[in-house]
Amino acid sequence: MRQVSVQAPATVSNVVCGFDCLGFAVDAPYDEMTVRLIDSRTVRIREHSDFGLPLEADKNVAGVALMAMMERLEGDTGFEVEITKHIKPGSGVGSSSASSCGAVVAANHLLGGRFSRAELVEFAMEGEEIASGEKHADNVAPCIFGGFVLVRSIDPVDIVALQSPPLFAAIIHPQIEIKTSEARAILLRDVPLKTAVRQWSHLGSLVAALAQGDYGLIARSMEDFIVEPVRKSLIPKFDEVKTASLGAGALGGGISGSGPSMFMLSEREETAREVERAMRNVYSQTGIEFNIYVSGINPDGVKIVS
Amino acid sequence: MRQVSVQAPATVSNVVCGFDCLGFAVDAPYDEMTVRLIDSRTVRIREHSDFGLPLEADKNVAGVALMAMMERLEGDTGFEVEITKHIKPGSGVGSSSASSCGAVVAANHLLGGRFSRAELVEFAMEGEEIASGEKHADNVAPCIFGGFVLVRSIDPVDIVALQSPPLFAAIIHPQIEIKTSEARAILLRDVPLKTAVRQWSHLGSLVAALAQGDYGLIARSMEDFIVEPVRKSLIPKFDEVKTASLGAGALGGGISGSGPSMFMLSEREETAREVERAMRNVYSQTGIEFNIYVSGINPDGVKIVS
């Protein structure tokens, strides 16, 4: 096989109390990508969408991820990539991850699956590094593994696929820009040990609640004592969106990635639709443009479509 | 029924990365207690062991826990308690918890089970408060629930019984005294956010590994970046015991409670016996007296025996 097309899904990272380690993939939105094997040690990129992605391989997240893979290949093997992007860069739902993960999963498929998923995470993290200046796996890991994943370690890469019951996400993306540098600078360097203990007690119980399919405990566990209290100031109407969503029946949620998107999880799809309406009510009064997605949890990550 | 006898097990709290929230119960050692209903609003205590426990109800952890329960009872109902203590106070394996939990579980049995386990945890925590000056549930919760438990919150009490595969603990108790106040004072008040993230990534993956019965991941997850590096200085030969135990096949472990006991978990009982030998080798060269226990995880907590 010389060519394959994939759908690379959006992902939510920094899931409430799971800052920097817990993420999940959703069914929609997703990017469409086609990757072709070529007999030249190079990566060529074309974009069919209008985001003005850099097309030089070493400046494009998919390109960088594929070059990292290429370093592990012998001979004159390279890749041609066509990207039709639907996930807006900077939205906080893993836009760059979708590109780099779609590329490496597709390429690995063409190579007969010679790399493990952990290796694909490593390659895709190289893309994340040029996108955000930092290697992190909490978007690429769910994008490649699907479902809820916990990143125990990125060096070495150790990704834990979590068990979870059916859940539905409502994600609102206000069309404002939050600079990653600002979202990072605003965080405290040190946290009180007592607060850290509360945070990890909640993460531990969230992981247990997901494994046990205990929706009540999922709801009680979704509290973030460290990041949300600081970062929510960057997102207009954060508290109103959260209050209205919980009022509509959401289990809980918070900031997706470093924002500006917010997500809320619900037990049932109808509830997630109610949450969507509640979010829309709050944001339609702001004058800020926004998109809302309602989606199930994507159990498989990047999907081979042809 | 007017009288019941129970066995109240030792417990390990502060399980590696689960400082202040993760604990488990073991089969041995345990305290033996007999509780009798009496028609007088009072708590009477007798000790059949030689630890010189305070016998005034308001100074004895079992007495305080029972008085907390008594406040929720109408009429002239009180308790008579006989304690045969086997778990040495101050050993770091939940000696005070065993007394207070044994008392409230026995009393609740005599009262027809009118209180929930969460309520029993509340009563027993009152005992913990007079023992350590602080309410905490990470010994009393496993003592009452059995198995591995995670304390999401103590106000309100929210205890998560965790799924876990068969595991065996080797626990060494060096006969030295560590003052709780010193063990607490030595901890840093603030921790770097980056370190806290590593800690909670590991706790999340430990909870997932227990739920999935993944022994390799249990081993990789048992790292403590915050408390052990500081507190191990209070325990002679801590590093040597740990290294020898891992060499003997232990999955991992650390300080039990605030020490001086150390515990190591193994997949099989034979391995735990090897770990026991390794611990004994290290400590027999110190001139410090010590006890070692090898035990399975106690799935039920306090046990009614007659």
Image (cartoon, coloured by chain):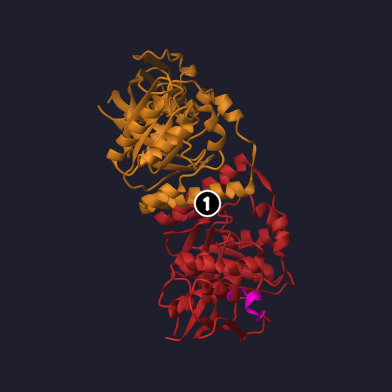
Chain colours: A orange, B red
Can residue B26 be seen from the camera position used here? yes
Quadrant occupied by the N terminus of chain A: top left
Secondary structure under tag 1 reads helix
Q: Taking A107 as reference, is A57 left or right?
A: right
Asked whether A297 or B127 is in front, the reply is: B127
**Residue A70 in the image: x percent, y percent?**
44, 25
Asked whether B173 or B33 is in front, the reply is: B33
Can residue B146 be seen from the camera position used here? no
The residue pinned by badge 1 equals A201
- Image quadrant in which you'd find residue A55: top left
Rendered view: A220 above or below A186: below
**Residue A296 in the image: x percent, y percent?**
31, 37
Disc 1 residue type?
A: Ser
Image mark 1: chain: A
**Residue A46 in the image: x percent, y percent?**
37, 14
Rendered view: B200 above or below B167: above
Total marks drawn?
1
- Does A269 lie within the magenta span? no
Asked whether B277 or B100 is in front, the reply is: B100
What segment carries the magenta color? Answer: B54-62
- Image quadrant in which you'd find residue B213: bottom left
**Residue B266 in the image: x percent, y percent?**
50, 63
